[in-house]
Image: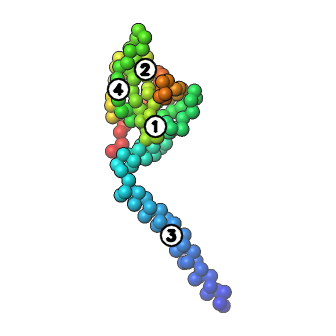
Amino acid sequence: MTETNAAPDAEPKAATDAAKPATQGVFRRAMHRLTSPEHVLDAERRQEEAVEQGGTPVGRCPDRQQVCVVGQLRTVTIQPRGQSPALQAELWDGSGTVDLVWIGRRKIAGIEPGRVLRAEGRITQREGRRVMFNPRYELRPAKS
């Protein structure tokens, strides 16, 4: 009979112990949000969104491999490349940046600073920066 009484007492204690790590995690996340600078929180949010949308974080993309990245365009400029113009956009996903370059283009509708974009192509290094030439792209709606 004492064995029967011990079992019900053990179950609520186990449930209470299991709830403690979740509570500590919530507290830790709340403290992180309250004490971290805004740019750090923005970078973390961008990385989460990029992964949710099927992208690989730029910081983990291997060179010379076909990859998909998702991020926000920070700058869009026209750069001369030899005799033809090139539209260049810097994509940032919170883990790093990659320059997207469309050779022979002066303007592409929808490619503007602040726009969220999904790009697929091969990443390479050029003058110490990650670059993707003539990527396939998809304009994404910005999350608020």
- The spot of residue 104 in percent (x, y) is 41, 14
Q: Quadrant of residue 102?
A: top left
The reply to whether dot 2 and dot 1 touch (C-beta < 8 Å) is no
- The CA distance from mark 2 to mark 1 is 20 Å
Residue 136 vertical placement versus 72 (above, below): above
**Amino acid identity at mark 2:** Trp
Q: Position of residue 6 (x, y in %)?
A: 62, 85
Ranked by sequence position, the earlier of labels 3 and 1 is 3
Q: Which mark is residue 102?
A: 2
Label 3 amino acid?
A: Lys
> In the rendered image, which quarter contains the N terminus?
bottom right
- Could you tell me which quadrant the C terminus lies in? top left
Q: Mark 3 against mark 1, which lies toward the viewer?
A: 1
Q: Amino acid at mark 1?
A: Gly
Rendering quarter of residue 92: top left
Task: Determine which residue is flagged by label 4.
Answer: 76
Choose the circle earlier in sequence order: 1 or 4.
4
Residue at x 41% of width, y 44% of height: 43
Give how far apart the Cα atoms at labels 1 and 4 are.
Answer: 17 Å
CB-based contact (under 8 Å), mark 1 and mark 4 = no
* Residue ID for mark 1: 96
